[in-house]
Each structure stands twice: as structure tokens, then as C-alpha cells.
Image (cartoon, helix red, strand yellow):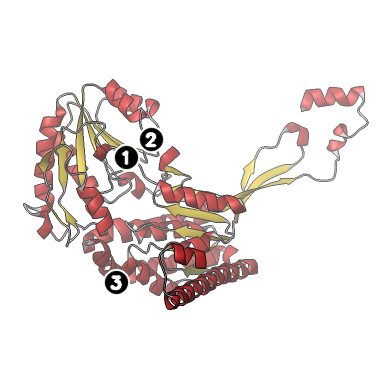
Amino acid sequence: MRNQLFAGGIQDTADVHEAAEANDVADVNEAAEANDAARTVGRLRETFATGRTRSLAWRRRQLKSLRALLTEQTPALAEALRRDLGKSPVETLTSEVRLVTNEIDHTLRHLHRWLRPQRVPVPAALLPARARTVREPLGVVLIISPWNYPVQLSLAPLVGALAAGNCAVLKPSELAPATSAELARLLPRYLDQDAVTVVEGGVRQTTQLLEQRFDHLFYTGNGTVGRIVMTAAARHLTPVTLELGGKCPVLICPGDDLATAARRIAWGKFLNAGQSCTAPDHVLAIGDTAGALERHLAEAVRAMYGPDPARSPDYGRIINDRHFDRLTALLGHGRVVTGGGHDRAARYIAPTVLVDVEPDAPVMAEEIFGPLLPILRMPDLDTALTFINAHDKPLALYAFTTDRRTRRRLLAETSSGAVGFGLPNAHLTVPGLPFGGVGESGLGRYHGRHSVETFSNAKAVLDKPLFPDTVRAVYPPFTTAKERLIRRFM
């Protein structure tokens, strides 16, 4: 400690003692937080051990209570989201609240069927016998949620965890502090406090949680932190779901209704000020479509947000100064068709369309995650497919084309977490579709039945009666007759 302090330039003895005391206090606080994390997980394990979370009645009660929270507390959640992200009440309703309530409704309708044991055929050599799979909850799970959709991406995974019969720790993002505080305030009022808990805080609190042994880790965010989560999980051999991101391309082919396509792209891109993991990241315009598309996009932005989007009550803001600075640094790459304006004090960046962007420009180097939409010209479909496949597999790929051969080629010759023809983002609103990425864009799936499968164990069960003892054919000593039977039936 002393060597480190003096190496840092502290010369005065009083300063040394003051710094040492500060470090001691920090160490004590960190130890206390670690104990808190361990006690939290231990308390939830005690609840799980009672078996009460396993009953279908308990699961349904929790889901209905969570739905009540969302419907009764929509104004409070909307205000928190306005403070954190500048979201409009209608955007909160559509992209945060309703998406989760629809997920709950779908789960409540089908949960009993999803939990039934599933019969599977038994090989002839084992007959008479019966085989089935039985779904059992994993135990205590940790859900680490991001800041961009802090209600939806916290509570949608929680729906699956509760439906599967687990206890859960929810760690909201500290970058959306108002929403995090609301979740911490409201969840204990509506859900079983002995089975679900919210832990607020930043990196240190998250690190303390990751030191604990969980039965599943569910993380939504970026790949850098995803690797940290996966490393922590490896210490306990804990399974993980990683919902990450990536540069989601949009393919525009000649012959389409470019005006409608532009409206849908603008909606998908500039929702939440572009801070969506499934948002169109860039457009690959085939042939001569780029010129007309840029005009239609400019018209679509004006129609949705007016001549000055900064005055629109329906357009959001960038989450913080760091992301604002990162995004504005990308504005100089390409010609601005519409937008480009920004105000750091208000964390505002206008919906911006860029053309004449080079494939190796900085704006194409990483996921944009903001309201900048580059358009790249592609001479033909083969060039576009080569470009897509030269980059990491995206969370979603979108295409506007009515040509069946082009659609087949996109499905067969590219890999992505999802494909959307004619509309971006919307696939995640379909509860029956699995949501997740592949490669750098994620690991694992959830939504609907896939959530229950993620948060439960499919236990294999074989039931072989003792009479008749047909297994005697494989008992030693092995005779010629037994060998013939084994060769014939096994």
C-alpha cells in the first residue's frame, strides 16, 4: 500500500494516512457488498429449496402480478424512461410495456402444455419400457439487463425465468438510473420478495454478483462485457445466454416500393434514437436504388419527426455524453442527406442519413447504436452477399425484395440470428419466434417457449419394469445365442 501511494506522488504523511484510511474503507465496503451478494443468493436458494416456485399455480400468479405491475404502473415507468432516454409515452407503451405484456399473455396461454412431460420412442432392444422428458427449473438465475430498453430487456427474460419456476436476481443497468430505481421499487410490491430481488449499482455490484454461483446467467449488452460474463460463468460451469448485437444490414433491391421501404427503415432505425440492437445499422443498395432511396428516407424522417426533430415529442435522446461523443465523431464520414445536427447539452443527435460511405469508413467499423444510417452502393446481389459474409454474423438481417430467388439466396447463403423481409425489428414481437444471435451477435435463444427451455432442464426419464427381465440378453457371460440377439436387436 505505501509503495503504491508514494509511487503515485503522495509525500505528506497526513496524506498517506488519509489515503490509506480511504482504501481501508473501500475494502470494507467491497467486502460488505460481497457479503450482501452472497446473502442475497443464499436467501433465494433457501426459497427455491422449499419447492414453492415449482408449482404451476405459483408461476401463473407471478406472471399475472408482473402483468399487473406493467399495466398499473405504466405512467411511472414512462416517466422514468423519459428521464433516462427521452422516450415518448407511446414509444414506452409499444416498445417496452406491450411487448412484455404480450409475452406474458402468450406464456400464460401455453405454459401448461409446455410443461407437460414429452413422450419419446424407446428402441426395440429396451422394450417393454417408457421414456419421457420432464422439465425442471434450474434454481437461481441472474439477469443482467442493458440501458437501451431497460424495462423490456429486464422483464422479458424474467417472464421466462418465472415461467420455468426459478428464483431470480435482476441487475438493471446503472446507465438508466431512473428506470433502475423504479424496477427496484415496484418489483417487490408485486412479486414474491423471497424469490425475486433487484440489485442496483454499477460495475462493482455486478462483479460481486458474478462472483456468486448461479444456475444460469442471462446477459443482454455488448460483446466486451459478454466475454467477462462468460469468463465468470466458466468458474462455476454455469450455462449462459448472451444477447449481444452487431451491424444489422438492410438489403434494398431494384423494383421495390422504395417509399414504403424507406418509411419502414426510418421507423426501425430511429426508434429510440437508433439505440436498438435490432435496428438497421446500414443499407446495402443494389444497383441504382440508392439515389431514390435517400430522397424517400429524407421525406420519411420529415413526416415522422417534422422539420426539426429536436422539437418532436416522439424522438428520443442519446443515453449519455460518452455515447454522444462517440456518435458525433462518426458524422464526418460520408455525405449528409438529412440530419447531422446535434446538441451535446441536450444529448440530441438528429436522425441522419449518410451516403457515399466507404466500406472501410469508421462508421462501418463497429455497431453504430445511434441515429446514423449509412447507405452503401452495391453493384449487384453477389457483391452484397460477399460484403455481408465478410463481416461478423449479425443479430438480424433485413431485406426488401419480392424476388423469390433473392430471398432463397439470402436464407441459404448468409447466417444471422433472424431474417426480416419487408420490416425491421418486428420479429422480436412474435412470441413464438426464438430471439437471439449467432457468433459475435449472441448465444442462446428466448421468448415464448424458448424462454422456458432456456431457464429449465429437460430431464431424461426412462422407466423399465423389472418383469420381464429382457435385459438378461446383455448380461455376461456372452454366449453365441446372446451375440446373435445383440447383433439383431441392438
**Where is residue 174 drawn, in percent x and y?**
37, 64
Could you tell me if the residues under marks 2 and 1 are in contact, i.e. CB atoms within 8 Å?
yes
**Mark 2 or mark 1, which has the lower sequence index?**
1
Q: Secondary structure at mark 2?
A: loop
Q: Which mark is residue 247?
A: 1
Residue toward you, 40 or 136: 40
Point out the image quarter for the C terminus. Answer: top right
Q: Secondary structure at mark 3?
A: helix
Q: Which mark is residue 76?
A: 3
Residue at left offset 13%, top offset 41%: 297
Q: How many C-alpha atoms fall within 10 Å of the one at disc 1: few (<14), some, or many (≥20)? A: many
**Where is residue 149 drawn, in percent x and y?**
33, 57
Q: Which mark is residue 392?
A: 2
Type of the residue with mark 3: Ala
Residue at left offset 28%, top offset 26%: 384
Residue toward you, 305 or 432: 305
Residue at left offset 30%, top offset 68%: 74
Q: Residue 315 sits in which quadrant?
A: bottom left
Type of the residue with mark 2: Asp
**Mark 3 or mark 1, which has the lower sequence index?**
3
